[in-house]
């Protein structure tokens, strides 16, 4: 599941929100907290909430100038497509009251957990929305809501064809599935694809990559 919320900010860069990401497991047994049962009798009440929180606005030094007094928080929670499969054939915004009721209930639970972790936002949330695997299917063209691409397994990384260069002349691959998931994986794959087209790219950008690595270590 995915939830996004916006609220007023105050004081300092990022409105008091952290620039770092937050993982909330709900306990020290991370394996147990990461488990998603094959089925749940009551998805709204029993869905595990392993949350990842990030504030893109807090990381953007120009955000306050462009959107004064506003901040954005993104909350991600792993889920199973099976929990939502019964509505897979419905149209977006027309999946029925049961689906909407489930989304509202999970939105309330996720929002409350976000407010527990970021109490400075309590009473200041102006807008909140939640997406499901079915939302990903509609907007991203996926089949089971797999927003982060191919399964992250050893077999996936061992595929000999999953490289920037292809057997077809002039066709190169880029994107998170070529490297690893997420924004960083997408950026790395673009660099790999550019290098496959022109090997001098690696030399030309070596200083930039070194500087980025030093900056990352320093922070």
Image (cartoon, rainbow, N blue to C red):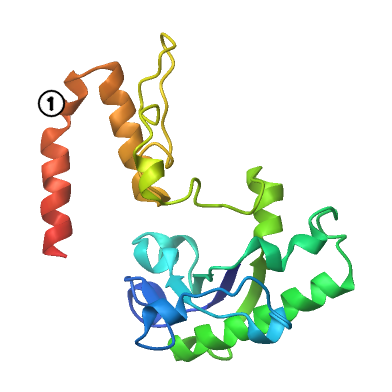
Which residue appears at 85% of the width and 55% of the height?
A: 90
* In the foreground, 20 or 68: 20
Q: Relative to 167, is 134 on the left or the right?
A: right
Rendered position, 147 above or below 65: above
Q: Quadrant of the N terminus?
A: bottom right
Query: Where in the figure is residue 164, as x and y percent of width and height?
Result: 36, 26
Q: Residue 219 appears in which quarter of the rendering?
A: bottom left
Which residue is drawn at the image coordinates 66% and 78% (left, top)? 107
> From what the image shows, is residue 79 above or below residue 121?
above
Q: Give residue 79's position: percent from left, percent from top.
A: 59, 68
Foreground: 197 or 10? Answer: 197
Q: Say whether residue 158 is left or right of residue 115.
A: left
In this picture, is 88 found above or below 29?
above
Would residue 13 be found to the left or right of residue 150 on screen?
left
> Measuring 81% from the left and 70% from the top, which residue is drawn there?
99
Residue under pointer 1? 203
Query: The residue tagged with tag 1: helix, strand or loop?
Result: helix
Counting from the top left corner in percent of width and height, residue 132 is at 67, 63
- Pinpoint residue 17: horizontal percent, then vertical percent: 39, 78
Q: Residue at x 32, y 71 (%)?
A: 20
Q: Depth check: give the residue in front, 80 or 4.
A: 80
């Amino acid at each position: 599941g995915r939830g996004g919320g916006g609220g007023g900010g105050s004081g300092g860069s990022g409105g008091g929100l952290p620039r770092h990401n937050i993982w909330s497991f709900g306990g020290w047994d991370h394996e147990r907290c990461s488990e998603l049962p094959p089925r749940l009798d009551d998805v709204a009440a029993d869905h595990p909430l392993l949350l990842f929180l990030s504030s893109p606005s807090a990381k953007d030094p120009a955000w306050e100038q462009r959107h004064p007094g506003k901040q954005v928080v993104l909350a991600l929670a792993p889920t199973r497509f099976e929990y939502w499969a019964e509505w897979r054939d419905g149209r977006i915004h027309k999946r029925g009251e049961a689906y909407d009721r489930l989304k509202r209930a999970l939105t309330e639970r996720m929002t409350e957990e976000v407010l527990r972790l970021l109490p400075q936002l309590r009473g200041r949330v102006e807008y909140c929305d939640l997406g499901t695997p079915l939302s990903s299917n509609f907007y991203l063209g996926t089949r089971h809501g797999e927003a982060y691409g191919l399964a992250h397994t050893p077999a996936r990384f061992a595929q000999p064809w999953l490289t920037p260069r292809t057997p077809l002349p002039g066709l190169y691959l880029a994107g998170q599935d070529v490297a690893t998931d997420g924004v960083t994986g997408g950026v790395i794959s673009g660099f790999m694809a550019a290098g496959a087209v022109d090997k001098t790219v690696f030399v030309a950008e070596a200083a930039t990559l070194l500087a980025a690595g030093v900056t990352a270590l320093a922070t």
